[in-house]
Amino acid sequence: MISMIGLIGGLALLTFLVMRGMNLLVVAPLSALFVAVLNGLPLFPQLAAEGQADFVTGYMDGFAGFITSWYLMFLAGAIFGKVMEDSGAAESVSNWIVSKIGMKHAVLAVVLACAVLTYGGVSLFVVAFAVYPMAISLFKEANLPRRFIPAALAFGSTTFTMTSAGSPEIQNWIPIPYLGTSPYAGWQVSLIVAIFILILGQWLLMKMIRKAVAKGEHFVERETDNKEKRNRLPYPLLSLIPLLAVLVVSFIFHDSLEQSALIIALLSGIITTWLLNRKYFRDFWSAVGDGTMGALIAIGNTAAVVGFGGVAKVTPAFETAVNFMTDIPGSPLIGGAIAVMVIAGLTGSSSGGQTIALPILAPHYLDMGVDAEALHRTVSLSSGTLDSLPHGGYAVTTIRSICGETHKSAYPSFGVVTVLVPLIGVILAVILFSLGLGN
């Protein structure tokens, strides 16, 4: 009982402190320490018996493991976003989009830009870095409150694209070896749910933005923004080429290099931006330096939260929670969905929710005769729900590190489009599969 209080209490403490705007590099290990103490974990490896988990090792394995896996991609993504901004390419693309679809669709333009890159295989974190400069330009032109930018970025990246059939994102590929399915599993239901999420999420996001504008909110510039008026910008179609280069190169090398393909793809985007727009740069190397510092802050904040998940995963309470979730009676699709989303919420990771739950769920449910494609799609969709709670790695990076907002101002809209709307999408998927669609 005390161990479960420690697990839930630690998560609540982390969420509360994050929403209060406290430094993640401090509050994440502090919250993890709370979990460890109430679960009886030794604090140091020297105090642990052979093979026994301890607080320091659990936290640092999660923290360092994330940096090892993602640092070069964070670095390349942040630099790419900065050189797109410094060259004027992001502003040029933004102006072109506005001229074509109108200022009233500026938010949709940001959402769709993220969706195209995400479905093209570009990492979610990298998409946020790459599209943020364009989002700033669009929101500034449309005079919309910038606190809604994180929601627009996340909605286009982590919802109707990340977990859909055919998506090259890892959240769609993890179930394959466990269930013997393909990336297109349950595509009929997936298509319906994706369209539903896009329509509902966009409607709710615009409703929140219009309400804020009606109350007098508008775009507010910051000291860190580039305020210099450009006399000339790169050609819009040329400015789109670096984005397309990232998309194409990522697609070409995705099967052979998997995640590492993004490093090559982003380097190609940086090089392409420099080659096509070098005469428009204010200061190329200064942009590279700014991007590097941004990457360090972003990955540090995210790794701090991942470290919390590393401690949570080795506690007795976590094992108890997983066993309880996987034994929920009723429809296996409902049980699978709840198990994956709760674990994703506890670890702050959509992929973590799947990799922990599927080794237990898959053989159990397949032996029961559950349709593998329906389970694949339900599990994938479910992983993209509670992973976006305030302490989630992507939420922290996008809101705090990339966009420079506070959770208090930005998370309400962020949570609506990344937690509430996908949850409704999961319910719709379960209903459609239960009715026999896609079988």
Image (cartoon, helix red, strand yellow):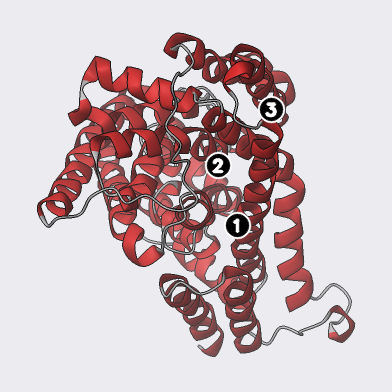
Instruction: Using the numbered discs, state the Cα–Cα distance from disc 2 to disc 3 in whole angstroms.
Output: 16 Å
Residue 415: where, in percent of width, then height? Answer: 33, 56
Q: Residue at x 63, y 66 (%)?
A: 313
Q: Of 115 and 171, which appears nearest the observer?
A: 115
Q: Of 75 and 67, which appears nearest the observer?
A: 75
The amino acid sitting under disc 1 is Thr
Q: Where does the C terminus fall, quadrant-wise? A: top left
Instruction: Using the numbered discs, state the Cα–Cα distance from disc 3 to disc 1 in whole angstroms.
Output: 22 Å
Q: If you read the primary sequence from the N terminus, does the residue marked by circle 3 or circle 1 appear first?
A: 3
Compared with residue 82, is residue 314 higher up or lower down, i.e. above or below? below
Compared with residue 10, is residue 372 higher up or lower down, i.e. above or below? above
Identify the secondary structure beneath mark 1: helix
Q: If you read the primary sequence from the N terminus, does the residue marked by circle 2 or circle 3 appear first?
A: 2
Between circles 3 and 1, the one closer to the viewer is 1
C-beta proximity under 8 Å, tags 3 and 1: no
Q: If you read the primary sequence from the N terminus, does the residue marked by circle 2 or circle 1 appear first?
A: 2
